[in-house]
Image (cartoon, rainbow, N blue to C red):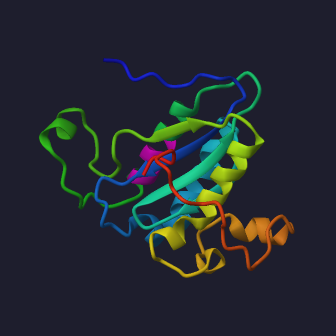
Amino acid sequence: MQYRRSRTHGGTFFFTTNLANRRSQYLVENVDVLRQVIRKVKINYPFRILAMVVLPDHLHTLWQLPDGDSNYPERWALIKSGFSRTLSKTEPINESRRLKRERGFWQRRYWEHQIRDENDLARHVDYIHYNPVKHGYVNKPVDWPYSSIHWYIRKNIMSEGWAGNNCEADGEFGE
């Protein structure tokens, strides 16, 4: 069965991407490498990051693709492979992945949701920024260092005391 993804050109999408080892700390331990890989991918495959949070074992992000472009799968493949290549091969690799010459670092799939309207966008931005609190890493969203909330605060879009009133997960966020 072929997985069907939205192919809206110039669309805005929310993504959840997980590591295979959900107890790992790799993403925050290597957040600078992740940032560098994303910057490199954006050079050849531009997109705009509207919001993002990096947690120890997964990340959430909102992307806006350029007009005429719907190829976010290529971007994710380049980000995931580019990041994995920078790390030592210490993770267990099962037979299926070994035969396909894959690493065992990321979960194969990611979850995406096409943003429908401004309200949907606002709910997902809030969800991203509140996620470190939801997982118990911090008490306030502003206390998590790997979040775009700091950009939103600098631009006076959110206040430092923002606590995320409408951020309850209702099954729509891919975790």
Of residues 121 and 50, which is closer to you in this image? 121
Residue at 38% from the left image edge and 39% from the top image edge:
109
Relative vertical location of residue 56 with respect to residue 122 in this rendering, above or below = below
Relative vertical location of residue 62 with respect to residue 157 in this rendering, above or below = above
Residue 67 in picture, x, y percent from top left: 77, 26
Which image quarter is the N terminus in? top left
Of residues 17 and 169, which is closer to you in this image? 169
Q: In the current view of this chain or complex, which residue is farthest to the top?
A: 1
Query: How many numbered marks appear?
Result: 0
Of residues 36 and 94, which is closer to you in this image? 94
Residue 144 in picture, x, y percent from top left: 58, 76
Q: Is residue 21 left or right of residue 155?
A: left
Residue 175 in picture, x, y percent from top left: 42, 52
Residue 147 in picture, x, y percent from top left: 62, 67
Relative vertical location of residue 117 with respect to residue 141 in this rendering, above or below = above
Residue at 63% from the left image edge and 64% from the top image edge:
129
Most prominent secondary structure in the magenta stretch?
helix
Q: Is residue 20 left or right of residue 152?
A: left
Residue interval drawn in magenta? 78-84
Q: In the current view of this chain or complex, which residue is farthest to the left?
A: 95
Q: Kindly indicate the quadrant of the structure image that contains residue 43.
A: top right
Q: Kindly indicate the quadrant of the structure image that contains residue 88.
A: bottom left
Residue 55 is one of the magenta-drawn residues: no
Residue at 55% from the left image edge and 59% from the top image edge:
168
